Image (cartoon, rainbow, N blue to C red):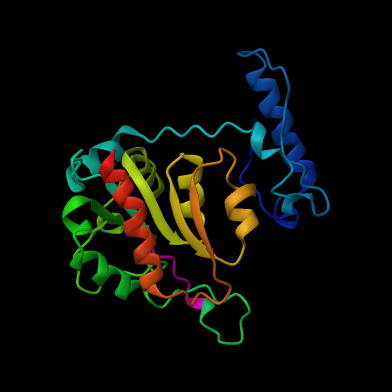
Amino acid sequence: MFMPNCYRLDNYPLKEFNKVVQNFYNKYSKRFNIIEHIYPKIQKKMFLQKGQFPQRQMIYEYFPRQRNYDLIDEHIPNDPSKPIVILSPRYRNNQNDPKSIRRRNWPYWQELYDSIVKSKLWNEFTFVICGKEDEYVKDTKNRFHDISKIETDDHSSLVGLLLVLLDRAVLTCGSQSAIPNLSLLKKVEVLEFGHQRSLHTKVYNVFNTRITYFDDPTYQIKPKIIFKNLRKILETKKEK
């Protein structure tokens, strides 16, 4: 499948796009027996249609570079007796407008962090905060492992680090965002809350990964509810 990095027809003309597509085909048809040449349509508004290709026919196999494994091994304990739990505290600077119908910044992350640290879960699991700099909520008391603090290089990336962690994680907890969605694709159980249940429990969940989802259109669900369910799920993980 050929998926070029183009987003707007006006800055990547259709004629040039088709030329790239054909050159790609000509080059690789000499090395491979191409059964079907699949590529995105970008004419008119087709470039906006992320559903051009059936999700359940896609291959969700990810291969992080070795440097990502090395960095995770250096910074995050891999102790089988303390399974990894990923926390995904999504935050966006432009989502705080009280008039916005999609205010998606949950204001209780610090309270959840405090509840985790005070509980017995803190000694039974390895909690790792995952997010991109300036787009997630840090622990103000600096008590958690945090992959954004790991310095990447030309042979590693933030998403590569996340993929390695997901291979070792037993649960991802967060508001609806890309990280829980990736967790579903990696078949790692998810505890999530947000305003688009069907998308995040069915459409994006192509492998029917176990997920506990709370409908929360205003992103005001109480942290004690999330913590209660986090504890409930993790208790089952310890039993295994």
- Residue 4, can we see it? yes
- In front: 153, or 139? 139
**Vertically, is 222 above or below 119?**
below
Q: Quadrant of residue 218?
A: bottom right
**Vertically, is 87 above or below 163?**
below
* Residue 38 on the magenta span: no
User: What residue sits 69% from the left and 35% below the top?
Assistant: 20
* Residue 92 on the magenta span: yes
Residue 135, position as x, y percentages in the image: 42, 67
- In front: 124, or 179? 124
- In front: 30, or 196? 196
- Residue 133, can we see it? no
Residue 99, position as x, y percentages in the image: 61, 87
Count how many numbered circles sit on residues in the image: 0
Residue 228, position as x, y percentages in the image: 35, 64
Q: What residue span does the magenta drawing correspond to?
A: 88-94
Left or right: residue 139 compared with residue 203: left
The quadrant of the picture occupied by the N terminus is top right
Residue 153, position as x, y percentages in the image: 30, 46
Q: Quadrant of residue 17?
A: top right
- In front: 28, or 179? 179
Left or right: residue 139 compared with residue 91: left
The quadrant of the picture occupied by the C terminus is top left
